[in-house]
Amino acid sequence: MKKKVLISGCLLGEYCRYDGATKEDKTVIEAFKDYEIISFCPEAPVLGTPRERISVLFKDKEYKVVTDETNKDVTALIKEQVDLQVKHHPDLEMIVLKSKSPSCGLGTTPILNEDRRVLMYDDGIAASYLKEKYPKINIVDEHNVNEST
Ligand code: SF4
């Protein structure tokens, strides 16, 4: 049986970014050619594509993902998508996420204050929740794949 890897859908060539674009990464795809690849995008299924941009805000001592124009808190929706993955794929070998995304970034996501100024860089909402749900699994972004496979 093949090992399973969960990968951000936009790295796999899916047109699931907020602007309808992709971020296909052939190095990632090649690195996992012998794995069973599970495509993961926590935003597209619940917010559609294209969609309004979202950002991570540090508010009331918590991180929340909020839409940029309509100011809607979509944190719970993004986390629900992670819960679905945990339910369907508890047996992952590894997770590869797209850097800088408000959902998928690993230590590279801008965290904004309520005036939308950058306070710091940290994990996106889906990334931090994936870490919590898969505490024993190696989670990297597209820039650290070769060191990890
Ligand atoms: S970075 Fe994550 S949320 Fe954004 S398009 Fe890629 S898979 Fe979807």
Image: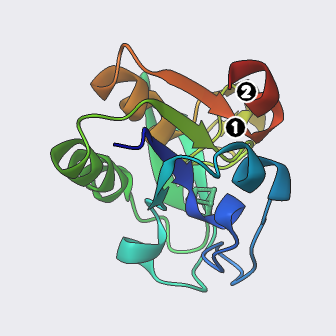
Q: Quadrant of ligand 1?
A: bottom right
Q: From the viewer's perspective, is 86 left or right of 117?
A: left
Horizontal and vertical percent for residue 3? Answer: 43, 38
Q: From the viewer's perspective, is 20 left or right of 124?
A: right
**What amino acid type should be assigned to the residue bearing mark 2?**
Tyr
Task: List the residue tagged with mark 2.
Answer: 121
Question: Which is more toward the observer, 51 or 42?
Answer: 42
**What amino acid type should be assigned to the residue bearing mark 1?**
Thr
Residue 8: image quadrant is bottom right
Badge 1 element: strand
**Of the numbered discs in the image, which one, if any, rests on residue 109?**
1
Question: Which is more toward the observer, 141 or 103?
Answer: 141
Q: From the viewer's perspective, is 111 left or right of 81?
A: right
Horizontal and vertical percent for residue 90? Answer: 23, 36
**Of the numbered discs in the image, which one, if any, rests on residue 13?**
none
Residue at 71%, 55% in the rendered image: 29
Note whether residue 6 is visible: yes
Q: From the viewer's perspective, is 11 left or right of 49?
A: right
Residue 117, above or below 121: below
Note whether residue 60 is visible: no
Figure quadrant of the C terminus? top right
Which of the two labelled residues, at mark 2 and mark 1, occupies the earlier sequence position? 1
Residue at 67%, 38% in the rendered image: 112
Residue 89, above or below 54: above
Badge 2 element: strand
Residue at 74%, 32% in the rendered image: 145
Question: What's the CA distance linking mark 2 and mark 1?
Answer: 5 Å
* Proximity of marks 2 and 1: CB atoms separated by less than 8 Å: yes
Residue at 69%, 35% in the rendered image: 141
Horizontal and vertical percent for residue 1? Answer: 33, 42
Residue positioned most to the front = 1
Residue 149, above or below 7: above
